[in-house]
Amino acid sequence: MRGDAPGLLLAVLGVAAALAVHAAVPAVPKLTAAVVLGMAAAHLPGLRPVVRGVARPGLSTAGKRLMRVGIVLLGLKLSLGDVLGLGWATVAMVLAVVAATFAGTLWLGRRLGLPGDQPLLVATGYSICGASAIGAVSQAAGSEEEDVAASVALVTLCGTLAIAVLPLLQHPLGLGEVEFGRWVGASVHDVGQVVATAQTGGAGALREAVLVKLMRVVLLAPLVAGVAVVVRRNLRVAKAAGVGAGAGAAGSGSAEGAAGKSVKTASRPPILPLFVAGFLAMIVLRTTGVLPERALDLAGDAQELLLAAALFGLGSAVHLPTMVRTGGRIALLGLGSWVVVAGVSYAGVLITT
């Protein structure tokens, strides 16, 4: 833990700075500010040696372990009753949006030849819940920190742009308060970004947006389990074929790419990682209604702080020169995925409302 202390302290300072930015400019979500500040810290001349040196272990710990705890607490935002109250038509719409966005983004990322697990992680972030989903799937896939950081940066940027762009499209697209809220909930990545975008359409829009968004978050658990199954299967195939450390290259850009990394460590990810089991347990606990509102509020605050620290750590791992080398391709992937999720969710909202 002593080796982690400098990085964890820097992450705490980064969270404090993100809270200050949000207080000064409420339109900027805390988590978005945390990612941007982490990226800035990694490139400022005075801080860069610290971030890449003595603080690196603690920042990596923040990006992994604190992310897991934050994801567990995210489950307390969900109630099965609220989600099912949306109606089966809306549930089916959300499933279709998630499936189309995930498959379309993964396919496009592979076609563009993006390195490592970036196609898988970007697909996850766009289809489920932004950086939180990327963190969860990266744990199951054994993704490289650089791939996680680049994917978080892209998804955060596009989700932030949605806060400004989607409200401008509400009236041209003929969306009422309820329809606009559901469109935002089905198409914007992070929960905080959903709230910031939907509140421009009124209280009804905000309620519908949050409920639809939380329905997408429920799908995080089966997606992580699915990725773990693919990694375990490919590990067995690689071992049977006698493939060594280079096995991951053939699967670059997908969950298969993680198989090579798993071969090197001879470890197989559990089908249901412990933090995902904790996430599901928190959903059940919230559904029982035994927790008072005060406890839920405190857990929500803790979850935001933990995710902010984790995102600061991930942001600090972004290496802009490396991103620039794939900048055109990753930007094209972000734009293409944005078109898919916005278009499919818009069609779904029109059909189901």
Image: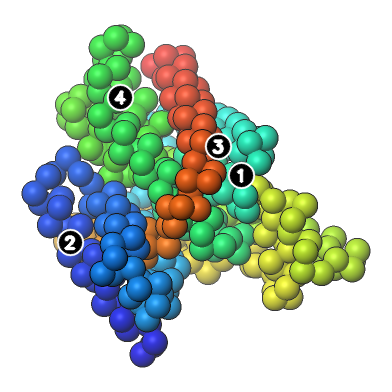
At x 48%, y 49%, the residue is: 323
* Disc 1 to disc 4: CB gap under 8 Å: no
Q: Earlier in the sequence, mark 4 or mark 2?
A: 2
Contact check, label 3 and label 1, Cβ < 8 Å: yes
Query: Along the line of sight, which residue is nearer the eye, 185 or 16?
Result: 16
Q: Residue furthest front?
A: 45
Query: What is the number of the mark on residue 329?
Result: 3
* Residue 215 appears anywhere in the view: yes
- At 53% from the left and 55% from the top, the residue drawn is 147
Q: Residue 72: x, y in percent?
A: 40, 63
Q: Residue at x 42, y 14 (%)?
A: 350
2 vs 3, front mark: 3
Q: Is residue 261 above or below residue 211?
A: below
- Mark 2 packing: few (<14 Cα in 10 Å), some, or many (20+)? some
Q: In this view, does 22 lie above or below 93?
A: below
Residue type indicated by callout 3? Arg
Q: Along the polypeptide, which appears first: circle 3 or circle 1? A: 1
Q: Name the residue under label 4.
A: 166
- State the CA–CA distance, disc 4 to disc 2: 28 Å
The disc labelled 2 sits on which kind of residue?
Ala
Q: What's under tag 1, amino acid-wise?
A: Leu
Question: Where residue 119 appears, x then y in whole percent?
Answer: 59, 44
The answer to whether 287 is drawn above or below residue 102 in the figure is below
User: Quick one: SS at disc 2?
Assistant: helix
Image quarter of the N terminus: bottom left
Mark 1–mark 4 Cα distance, whole angstroms, equals 28 Å
Question: Residue beneath label 1, please?
Answer: 114
What's the distance in space between the residues labelled 2 and 3, CA to CA?
A: 32 Å
Q: What residue type is labelled 4?
A: Leu
Q: Position of residue 154 (x, y in %)?
A: 43, 44
Q: Where is residue 309 in the image (x, y as percent from the top left)?
A: 31, 65
